[in-house]
Amino acid sequence: MSTTKMTEQNIKLQLTRVFAAPRELVFQAWTDANHFSQWFGAAACHGGSLQSVKVDARTGGKYRIQVRRADGEYYTTVGVYREVKPPERLVFTWQFEKDGSGDEYGEVEPPETLVTLEFNARGTQTELILTHERFASTDSRDRHEEGWTRCLDSLGNFVGK
């Protein structure tokens, strides 16, 4: 009798940026719904519009980001904060809703991925290390790399480069 050992592959992405802003401000840009809407929407919508942002930035709290694309399709990201340590670290799950057009949290699609943000003070600047892991494929990781790169560019414009 033979057995097959399955190993879970952890496909991950890591991006590092330095912003000319204190880490408290950079952290707040991720945890305050108003601030988040100002920079994330500009990067994520590609000609569409940010419909709503809900943020309950505490361990166990949820977030929901609803975007309506130019073609009318919705893509809505949801997750749970696993760790909130101001202004040093945020860890949250990242999933897409199957039908993100509603106003409330809906059924999610697998896989559940994990995002870790580390905010390191570098004098008057902040080094942000974004790690996104547990991708189902390298293609998915690569698409997220494009999106996160646009988001970090937009965040830089919001907090100062």
Image (cartoon, helix red, strand yellow):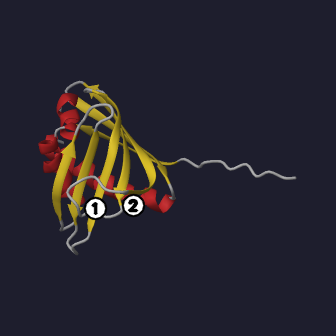
Q: Is residue 92 visible?
A: yes
Residue type beneath disc 2: Arg
Residue type beneath disc 1: Gly
Q: Residue at position x 22%, y 75% from top?
A: 71
Q: Residue at position x 24%, y 52% from top?
A: 65
Q: In x, y percent, where is residue 149?
A: 31, 53
Q: Residues within 10 Å of mark 1 (few under 14, many from 20)?
A: many
Q: In x, y percent, where is residue 89?
A: 33, 30
Q: Can residue 160 be seen in this view?
A: no
Residue 100 is tagged as: 1
Q: Residue at position x 84%, y 53% from top?
A: 2
Q: In x, y percent, where is residue 75?
A: 29, 62
Residue 18 sits in which quadrant? top left
Please, is residue 11 above or below residue 146 in the view?
above
- Identify the element where label 1 is drawn: loop
Provide the residue designation for mark 2.
143
Sequence-wise, which precedes: disc 2 or disc 1? 1
In-image side of 80 versus 137 (left or right): left
Residue 73 sits in which quadrant? bottom left
